[in-house]
Amino acid sequence: MVYRWHQNYFYILYISVHFYISEFVFFTEEERRVRANDREYNEKFQYASNCIMTSKYNIITFLPVNLFEQFQEVANTYFLFLLILQLIPQISSLSWFTTIVPLVLVLSITAVKDATDDYFRHKSDNQVNNRQSQVLIGVTLLYTVYVFQADLLLLSSSEPHSLCYIETAELDGETNMKVRQSLSVTSELGDPNNLAQFDGEVVCEPPNNKLDRFCGTLYWKDCKYPLSNQNMLLRGCVLRNTESCCGLVIFAGPDTKLMQNSGRTKFKRTSIDRLMNTLVLWIFGFLVCMGVILAIGNAVWEKEVGALFQSFLPWDPPVDNFLFSAFLSFWSYVIILNTVVPISLYVSVEVIRLGHSYFINWDRRMFCSRSNTAAEARTTTLNEELGQVEYIFSDKTGTLTQNIMTFNKCSINGRAYGEKPSVHSDLVYITCYSQRVQPLDFSAWNPLADRDFCFYDQSLLEAVMVGEPAVHEFFRVLSLCHTVMSEEKREGVLVYKAQSPDEGALVTAARNFGFVFRSRTPGTVTTHELGKAVTYTLLAILDFNNIRKRMSVIVRNPEGRIRLYCKGADTVLFERLHSCNHELMNITSDHLNEYAGDGLRTLALAYRDLSEEQWEAWAERFRGADKATDCRDDRLAAVYEEIEQDMMLLGATAVEDKLQDGVPETIAILSLANIKIWVLTGDKQETAVNIGYSCKMLTDDMTEIFIVNGHTVQSVREELRYNAQGWGGACAFGNGCGGDGASNWVPNKSKCSPPQAPPSSLLESISGEFALIISGHSLAHALEADMEREFLETACACRAVICCRVTPLQKALVVELVKRHKKAVTLAIGDGANDVSMIKTAHIGVGISGQEGIQAVLASDYSFSQFRFLQRLLLVHGRWSYLRMCRFLCYFFYKNFAFTMVHFWFGFFCGFSAQIALDTGYWTAINHFFIWGSLGTYFTILFAMHSSILFNIFPKQFHFLGDAHNTLGQPVVWLTIALATVISIAPVLAFRFLKLDLKPQLSDTVRNTQLVLQKKRKPGGRVGRGVGSGSRRSGYAFAHQEGFGELITSGKNMRLSSMALATFASRHSSSWIDTLRRKKHDGLFLK
């Protein structure tokens, strides 16, 4: 069957290798084997089909699977157990619908939510799986503009040298174009007849989630050819600037690298969730205790007096064993008192969280009109956690800064260029300077110049025009040593697509100074040097990575000279310079330090001339390492090291990355809220320190700024301990440390032994403001197991911490260290792919949608476009969410306990018979009234009291500063429960005591009279005889039987026959109790 899809005047022809679905085949795949145009061979392995299924349910499985998932919750299982108990007539005092109705309601709400989420997953799956294409057997032929639906091996393309330009925004968030190239042996397979005859076999690595790595081998015509990531077109990429290409499907469906990377993010739970789970367990234990108490009361009552009530309150059949009666009573009270464990708690909490998420999404003050980006709560479970953040871990580039790079200054052959005032110049100087110096005008002599580029030093332009060799070579490096793609939309209008803003700024600078990068092919780079077109042969690209921290290209100029150009971090490049560069290196280092002091990002440039023999020998080793199938990356790195030696220094560049709007004010307010901010950046120390001053993290008022820059474990430990000694010295000179043991601690400054670690009490009692700056190589030692705790205590005692030259893994390790030991809520914020690990590790991850793509946003819990919005997210929405949730939970527990304790106390007045005190319909109406009415009133008042209007009018009375983490805790909840218990019994006790004084019953009067008479008796004495009694004894005292006095005063009835009762009523016109009252002074009462 053939499908055609016409879009943008291009036809898309999709020819995929057929694979069987293998989702239910569980085996460990050690290698992947794919043979083109051989269905029978491929079917043997039962690889996954290209159908994507991210949904969880279908029409048949939804109900059983969803119910099974919901009953994994302890609360739902508990109420199902209660429902089963209510179906037993012997123990049920309530109708079964009182439990099944709220249970079904809770399950239905959750099921509707799950069904809605799964509907959108089905919709997304159908949109992907039903993309129209033409399906045949063989390989894949694709036309622009097309989104790849499988991981393909590029075989050929319509571009020269089988180049293919792609956009990988869906994979890594980078919007710049990247280039892929097929093997030269398959570049002529574009014809359909040749594709039909292609029978090559690919043996490669099994499916994995590494987007930047692919290792495999193509076997064809008795030869083998190494395959790398440069030959792959991954699912999710978009074909750009290429008319057509063809490829062989390697991974399909769930085996693609995109789907391998789309695993579920780790579920994050808030402290309130953990507290609720703990409280529910404790409350359930409290319920059991109440049931046991009432069951014991039932057993005692049944044994002592229960049998006397069988004729007055008969039950059928009677329970002969009081223990069995107590057992039934226990389960009856478990049913009656079940409201102490709220069935609607979790649903109510989720509804409130959803509302708070909409508040964040609708906040106009967190909307950036420039980028048309609104704040987004990508999760609904962490809103109240925002109000408890104590540590913020922030990236610098693109997060604190704009990540819009401008070429500002440079150093060429020992001379500094660029006179633009630094970011620390005062306003008066800047104003005077702007009137005196204007940006250079490049358009007069360079028609290809970028009009938005600004530079302020005329001498550099003059050096280019007079032809200084070092200056020309400097800009030649910038125009050749890069991976930028050029797109010429119309004659003379160039658009550069760079992998990083730094690289784009450097190429743009070379363009304005006359060295214009025009185009590239796999083997050539074409530039215009001062108006003259020059084509260089591109021999090799030694690409950049985080370990190498440099990039090199080897080119052959039109005269035949071979030269290596390199740019990279100065710390790495200076180690590979020729010894004759010592003096120039010192001068350039001074310039680099000056640039870093101005907050500029720096790179060093160098070159090396290669002879033909050197190139041929090295190229042979390079080809051998490139064809290796095992440890290929390590072998290439070793070969790169061989050629990148004995280079000649050209100079250095300085690129400015400005702070975002409102960053200093935001950091200042967050610091006032006792929230500590750590900056984790890959920039050099000087640049990071200068940015720290610019954003007010570091100030001149600080007591001291400590720098840890050791290269060994011992040196790092000593530096950390000497820093702590500095704190001890500050305490000793009157900063008021105090504390037990702190004032007596004297640092060991002996040269024979290393410094001692200070006690934790000293670190806790530090007064003054300190800052810690630590480099990446020192941080690697500080994070070791035997030193991490000491580093953590030292860093947490500082107001500001800046970690420089750190890797993405180190960022995550720092966050994990604070999470593990400090038990504090952490927040990580970043904008690039190197921040993803940090964002996922922290309790809360915030992504900045900036220049480095959306990968950080996709991995985050909250996202917006400006760092300054973090202030409102934490101090307004975070506090609102947390305070509202805490008040709601306290009210919820109070309401449930107040109702439940009424039934508990009622058990003491109904013979522990498990009777309900309130009608179920009445309670339902009251429950809804108090829930919705009180919550509506409460939230209205709370919104008014915590509004931004009151904050602006009365900032001191209504402030949003500080993390609120003491509003709800176990003591608060138990105090609420105790209050509900007291309130539930206080009215009853007060009524009974007041009734004894105001309107006593007859039995109460008799009992009080007996107590008064007993107090009048002499202690230990005997009752005296009457006058004239002598030794005569009364026969009444011996012959009469025991009376019913105790029964009368106890309030119980005497069982009399109807005849006797009538006779007694006719003979006595007044109560015999009145007679007893008239004889209250008779001596017989003393008996």
Image: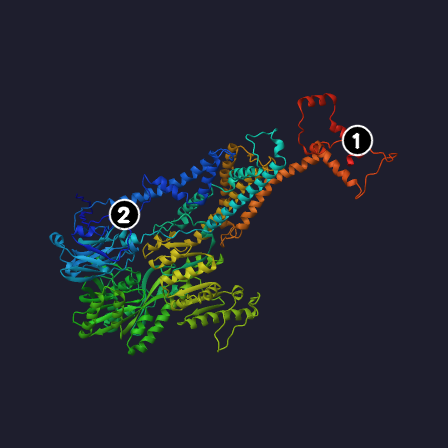
Report helix, strand or loop for mark 1: helix
Q: Where is residue 769 in the image (x, y as percent from the top left)?
A: 50, 65
Residue extending farthest left: 193
**In the displayed structure image, the side of residue 695 where residue 90 appears, left or right:** right
Secondary structure beneath dot 2 equals loop
> Would you call the spot at circle 1 few (<14 residues within 10 Å), some (14-19), or many (20 or more)?
few
Q: Which of 830 and 1035 is in front in this view?
A: 1035
Residue 499 at x, y = what percent? 28, 60
Residue 358: quarter of image: top left
Asked if residue 1008 can be seen in this view, the reply is yes
Q: Tell me the amino acid under the disc marked 1.
A: Tyr
Q: Residue 1036 carries which label?
A: 1
Mark 2 is on which residue type? Ile
Residue 1: quarter of image: top left
Circle 2 residue: 52
Q: Are marks 2 and 1 in contact (CB under 8 Å)?
A: no
As drawn, the label of residue 662 is none
Q: Where is residue 648 in the image (x, y as percent from the top left)?
A: 27, 74
| Placement of 523 over or under 1048, stated as above or below | below
Residue 491 as seen in the image, left or right of residue 664? left
Mark 2 crowd level (few <14, some 14–19, many ≥20, 10 Å Cα) = some
Instruction: Residue 488 in the image: state x and y as whole percent.
Output: 21, 57
